[in-house]
């Protein structure tokens, strides 16, 4: 239902993940009987977790390690891993820089050109390490880098930018449409990011093998503040999922939706799945891993933008291993570890045995759910300086 901003401007009320809650079902399911698997094209994965294509989160070793755990790591093919023969030095510089120097430093470090031989080498290294090679490319670089990655053995290609559309207008010349890029690629091509029904439908009709949802909710992203653009994640996921369901009804082809950004703890994962996502993309949650290349820091893909940075470096602190964060056992009580068990338990309480059944869970608007009756927890955290 629309509300009004002023006398005539209709606006729509939207919701973030913190404003909703899941209602337990009248018949519950044993968490051990819950199946968390999902698919992209012909590939099936045990866990619905993808690590964000950020230099602070994924390198070759992390991508391979996540594959062995049943999840996916997405390597940024326009990041430090493909600009430097040895990316350890620039990673150390970013992690060690004082806050006032981070933007200028990242801008300088990311000026080094992407090298095609490093693109091929990194993809091949993931494959040789027994990993599923999922790589991310921006639309402008996709026609050049996607063939290189594909020849090197990439299993899935992600075309990703702040906002992706099938149609882009520019007086500077015609860009290559997403549908043409997909048609030229043999492996599944996932596309993002989008937040609306119409944009999602256009990308589905263009042949996308998966859709990423989210503009600006990530911990290190400042796009919403810098640009004023974005849609709260619960509404965005539900709108894109609605397009996916309609497209599935028309075409018979089911396309997974991935909630990208704003997913920090187990409850966020469960609510994103209930809103219609098939998997979630994790940034800061996995930047905390001991294996993460960010060394206890996290920064976004748009942080080093040469003219308009839309991200910042945030300190996340290493709290555990990749296995602890995804599969436990948890050593923290804040929901940031053992995300798989948290999701299984939530699904069981909602009576869902599969991801598809979780899409039918009852959702309510409950903005005080996280704070109701928790005054002692909050006062203790303040007293402990957390």
Image (tube, rainbow, N blue to C red):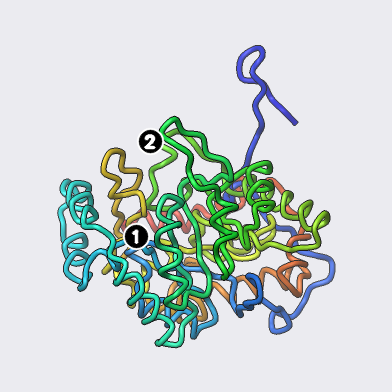
Name the residue located 40 percent from the left edge and 87 percent from the top edge: 129
Q: Give the spatial CA distance, label 2 vs label 1.
A: 22 Å
Between marks 2 and 1 in the image, the one whose residue lies nearer the viewer: 1
Q: Can residue 189 be seen?
A: yes
User: Quick check: 375 above or below 61?
Assistant: above
Name the residue located 64 percent from the left edge and 45 percent from the top edge: 235
Label drawn at residue 78? 1
At numbered mark 2, what does the secondary structure look like: helix, strand or loop? helix
Name the residue located 69 percent from the left edge and 47 percent from the top edge: 201
User: Quick check: 231 above or below 331?
Assistant: above
Q: Can residue 337 be seen?
A: no
Lower sequence index among marks 2 and 1: 1
**Position of residue 296 measured from the top left corner of the image (x, y, whole percent):** 28, 66
The residue closer to the viewer here, 355 or 187, is 187
Q: Residues within 10 Å of mark 1 (few under 14, many from 20)?
A: many
Which picture quadrant has residue 266? bottom right
Mark 2 touches mark 1? (CB < 8 Å): no
- Residue behind mark 2: 226
**Position of residue 157 measured from the top left corner of the image (x, y, whole percent):** 50, 66
Residue furthest to the top in view is: 7
Q: Quadrant for the C terminus, please.
A: bottom left
Name the residue located 46 percent from the left edge and 51 percent from the top edge: 139
The residue closer to the viewer here, 166 or 265, is 166
At numbered mark 1, what does the secondary structure look like: helix, strand or loop? loop
**Position of residue 183 measured from the top left corner of the image (x, y, whole percent):** 60, 59
The residue closer to the viewer here, 23 or 150, is 150
């Amino acid at each position: 239902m629309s509300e009004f901003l002023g006398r005539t401007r209709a606006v729509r009320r939207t919701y973030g993940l913190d404003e909703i809650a899941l209602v337990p079902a009248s018949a519950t399911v044993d968490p051990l009987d819950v199946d968390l698997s999902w698919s992209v094209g012909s590939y099936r994965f045990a866990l619905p977790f993808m690590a964000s294509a950020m230099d602070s989160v994924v390198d070759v070793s992390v991508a391979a390690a996540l594959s062995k755990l049943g999840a996916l790591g997405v390597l940024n093919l326009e990041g430090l891993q493909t600009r430097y023969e040895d990316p350890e030095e620039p990673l150390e510089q970013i992690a060690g820089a004082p806050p006032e120097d981070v933007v200028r430093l990242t801008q300088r470090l990311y000026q080094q050109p992407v090298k095609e031989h490093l693109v091929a080498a990194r993809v091949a290294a993931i494959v040789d390490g027994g990993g599923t090679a999922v790589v991310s490319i921006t639309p402008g670089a996709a026609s050049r880098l996607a063939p290189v990655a594909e020849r090197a053995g990439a299993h899935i290609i992600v075309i990703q930018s702040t906002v992706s559309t099938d149609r882009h207008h520019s007086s500077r010349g015609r860009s290559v449409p997403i549908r043409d890029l997909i048609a030229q690629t043999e492996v599944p091509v996932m596309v993002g990011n989008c937040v609306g029904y119409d944009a999602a439908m256009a990308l589905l009709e263009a042949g996308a093998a998966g859709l990423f949802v989210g503009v600006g909710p990530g911990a290190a992203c400042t796009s919403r503040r810098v640009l004023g653009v974005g849609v709260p994640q619960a509404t965005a996921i539900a709108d894109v999922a609605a397009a996916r369901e309609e497209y599935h009804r028309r075409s018979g082809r089911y396309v997974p939706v991935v909630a990208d950004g704003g997913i920090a703890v187990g409850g966020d994962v469960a609510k994103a799945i209930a809103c219609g996502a098939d998997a979630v993309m994790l940034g800061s949650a996995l930047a905390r891993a001991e294996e993460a290349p960010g060394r206890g820091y996290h920064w976004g893909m748009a942080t080093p933008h040469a003219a308009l940075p839309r991200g910042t470096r945030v300190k996340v602190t290493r709290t555990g291993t990749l296995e602890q964060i995804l599969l436990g056992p948890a050593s923290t009580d804040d929901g940031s570890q053992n995300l798989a068990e948290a999701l299984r338990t939530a699904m069981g309480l909602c009576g869902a045995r599969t991801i598809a059944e979780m899409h039918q869970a009852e959702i309510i608007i409950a903005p005080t759910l996280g704070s109701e009756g928790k005054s002692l927890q909050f006062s203790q955290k303040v007293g402990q300086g957390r």
